[in-house]
Amino acid sequence: MLSITNPSNGTVIAELPEDTHETVHAKYKGARVAQAAWAVTPLRRRVGAIERFRAGIVQHLDHLAAVLTSEVGKPIKQSRNELNGLLGRIDFFLAETEKTLAPREVFNDGGMVETIHHEPLGVIANISAWNYPYFVGANVFVPALLAGNAVLYKPSEYATLTGLEIGKLLHASGIPQDVFAVLVGGGRVGIELLKEPVDGVFFTGSYGTGKRIAEAVAGRMIKLQLELGGKDPTYVCEDVDVAAAAASLADGAMYNTGQSCCSVERIYVHERIHDAFVDAFVKEVQGFKVGEPADESTYIGPLTRSQQVKLLSMHVADAVAKGAKLLAGGRPLDRPGGHWFEPTVLGNVNHDMAVMREESFGPIIGIQKVSGDDEALRLMNDTDYGLTAGVYTKDALRAQRLLSRVNAGSVYWNCCDRVSPRLPWSGLKHSGVGLTLSTFGIETFTRPKAWHLRSV
Ligand code: NAD
């Protein structure tokens, strides 16, 4: 049985039977049969089902937000923000899928015609993370279903109730039961799923698990996409409005209790404004309301996973032992049964410290003083990851010069912690391979087939 607990206080909120080798296999077999019919269902009808799914999200938004908050500990306002943000993503896919997947003539000399057709991959496995389960799930299953695939969806064990709600809504919207199947369980169920002969694996989660998944499917010649972690840097130049930059970056580091793949995880500040920036940043962080996730005024809630409390404590202890200055927070919060950590700011940090090298995935940030652009750029690129990176400056040319030399899938000028459905979402190095979102993130669920046609 899988116990679902409220991370705020440890209360068990549900006990669910986990999938087994047999049930995973049965779901795979059902999906394989159902996919053939789904692939030839007119696109208009597939679009209609996703339109009804969208309407269902709107209709049940408060309930869905409450479920998400209860199992993940996401502050309730941020749960509603995620669901409202999901609507924009669905709208993008609804608007772009037909155009993107339409057969395209690329050559015609009167005798020979060449066209590209998009065929679905088939049955795909979608193994997902808990921190933004609607976003990272829908980035895969919405375009995958629209393109005619069947989806075996394994939500994270920390967001299972949300995964089941998604399944219920999709089925009520007209997606056949076997075309979208939810698998309940943790890593063991993920391993079982990967034993099935699926046609593609789409994973969102940590680098460590991503590596294990890549090893598990090696040699099978199926499509593999891995959207993994980050250690996302931002450089603050000396020409900024210090208070505005500090407010924006404090939010970018601590929103969702710092548990976003694109959270700001490292800040480099030009020496000329360093002290003023640090003061403004600490003031912002000290103004964040820490509290019960169900409370409307809460900004920082519990950590979703208990083990993260230990990791953040280790990052603080390691940094302080190596000379960092603790500027705010730094300790677990004593709230019975829950997993809580004070919003934490570390100054005087350097790259010998784990807090500047390993993904922290919590409300903690290191701020390092730099002498100028060259040092900032070198430090931003001194990482195993490559998800996002940003620069705050009034100078557009300077931002362009820096951002074109930083190794990251997404780059930001005077903004951070942002994802757009219109732009491809991808990472370099340990941040992953492949992409979701944008029209490329629709095509990725298809196999382009080349047609060479001579009419006589
Ligand atoms: P995780 O790697 O612990 O788990 C992810 C999923 O993999 C879960 O569903 C889990 O049950 C499953 N799993 C675990 N072991 C498995 C195995 N051996 N085989 C198959 N499946 C297995 O990650 P998490 O804690 O759920 O998510 C947090 C991580 O995800 C962070 O590193 C974060 O940066 C990353 N993330 C990345 C993006 C992105 O778009 N790049 C988005 C959200 C989260």
Image (tube, rainbow, N blue to C red):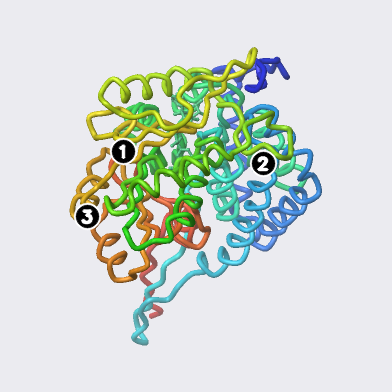
- Looking at the image, is mark 2 or mark 3 nearer the viewer? 3
Q: Are marks 1 and 2 in contact (CB under 8 Å)?
A: no
Q: Measured from the top left, where is residue 418 in percent x and y?
A: 49, 53
- Which amino acid does the dot numbered 3 rest on? Gly
The residue labelled by disc 1 is 430
The residue labelled by disc 3 is 372
- Looking at the image, is mark 1 or mark 2 nearer the viewer? 2
Q: Residue at x 27, y 47 (%)?
A: 380
**Quadrant where the C terminus lies?**
bottom left
Q: In the rendered view, tell whether residue 99 sits above or below residue 243.
A: below
Q: Residue furthest right?
A: 59
Task: Give the Cα separation between the discs numbered 2 and 3.
Answer: 39 Å
229 with respect to 418 (left or right) = left
Q: Measured from the top left, where is residue 233 in percent x and y?
A: 34, 46
User: Mark 1 vs ligand 1: CB under 8 Å?
Assistant: no
Q: Measured from the top left, where is residue 52 in percent x and y?
A: 75, 54
84 with respect to 56 (left or right) = left
Q: In the rendered view, tell whether residue 283 sits above or below residue 112.
A: above
**Quadrant where the N terminus lies?**
top right
- Which amino acid does the dot numbered 1 rest on? His
Q: How many neighbours does mark 2 have within 10 angstroms: few (below 14), some (14-19), or many (20 or more)? A: many
From where the camera sits, is residue 125 visible?
Answer: no
Disc with the residue nearer the chain's start (2 vs 3): 2
User: Mark 3 vs ligand 1: CB under 8 Å?
Assistant: no
Residues 184 and 449: in front is 184
Helix, strand or loop at label 2? It is helix
Report which quarter residue 405 is drawn in.
bottom left
Task: Give the Cα separation between the discs numbered 1 and 2.
Answer: 28 Å
The residue labelled by disc 2 is 79
- Looking at the image, is mark 3 or mark 1 nearer the viewer? 3
Q: Measured from the top left, where is residue 108 in percent x and y?
A: 37, 82
